[in-house]
Image (spheres, grey):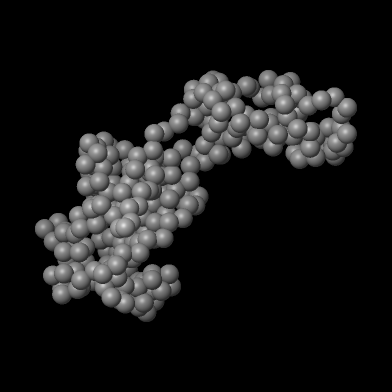
Amino acid sequence: MTVGYLPNTATWGNASHEPPRDGLVATSDPVYLRVVEDIRRQITDGTLPPGAPIPSRAQLTRKYQVGETAARHALRVLASEGLIIGRVGSGHYVRERPVLTSLHRWRYLDHPAPIAADLQSQGRRVTWEWHSEPAEAGPDIARRLRVRETTTLTKTHYVFRGDGRPLQLATSYEPMDFAPHTEEERRSLFARLYAHGIKVTEVVESVSTRVPRPAESDALDLSAGVHVLHVERTHWAGDRPVETSDIVIPGDRFRVTYSMPA
């Protein structure tokens, strides 16, 4: 017998000699977590397919023998994970599973907009907008470019869209002498640096996942619970970093693909 503490909110497991319902294993974990795990399992294995309705709070309280607070919290957790979506006046439904598009990170490095070239080769219509401004390096970018924190750089913001939908955000930092200042000057970074007698010898990318910032969620039109891929990319000329970028990609729309020379 598993004995659980029962506070007034009824959010912890109850002691019982009865076998658990629906194959749930009785533990001393909060009840709402067991509800979350069971519904998550049903979504993952297809028992609850995309678009299927999720039981209401009242139905969850009856099915899992939990309090309304636990049922409400379970729905909130599932929504925060991006597994379900709520519709006002209708309830919750299993979220549609997006088809992930591959982004090939090394295929179009010498293009002014590598993501645009990549997706256009896959039949997507991609547009982008950008604007540049002078900005102080600050601690992080100064470390990445090996300059003083007070160094003035050219900071360029990019927003890429496919068929009108936001696809990617990017912010680039480079010495002011190298950066383009007009549309006519906008060429690939490789070509612009070469015009200054600088040859890129290495591109280093570090990829991580994180919770999006509010402005990023708005700009990328992200659903609740969706994380982003954060690519920190730096171009090197020998032992000198000559440009660094922060690239933000929706984690529910893309898979990042790398090809390495044999």
The image position of residue 135, as x and y in percent, is 32, 68
Compared across the picture, whether 222 is left or right of 70 comes to: left
The image position of residue 106, as x and y in percent, is 29, 55
**The furthest residue to the left:** 184
Q: Residue at x 31, y 64 (%)?
A: 203
Query: Which quarter of the image is occupied by the N terminus?
Result: top right
Q: Residue at x 48, y 46 (%)?
A: 227
Q: Where, by quadrant of the figure, is residue 109 drawn?
A: bottom left
**The furthest residue to the bottom:** 148
Nearer the observer, 74 or 189: 189
The image position of residue 176, as x and y in percent, is 23, 71
Q: Where, by quadrant of the figure, is residue 183 drawn?
A: bottom left
Compared across the picture, whether 37 is left or right of 64 comes to: left
Q: Where 93 falls versus 155 (above or below)?
A: above
Q: Where 209 falls versus 142 (above or below)?
A: above
Query: Which quarter of the image is occupied by the C terminus?
Result: bottom left
Q: Residue at x 52, y 36 (%)?
A: 82
Compared across the picture, whether 172 is left or right of 92 comes to: left
Q: Residue at x 30, y 58 (%)?
A: 261
Nearer the observer, 109 or 214: 109
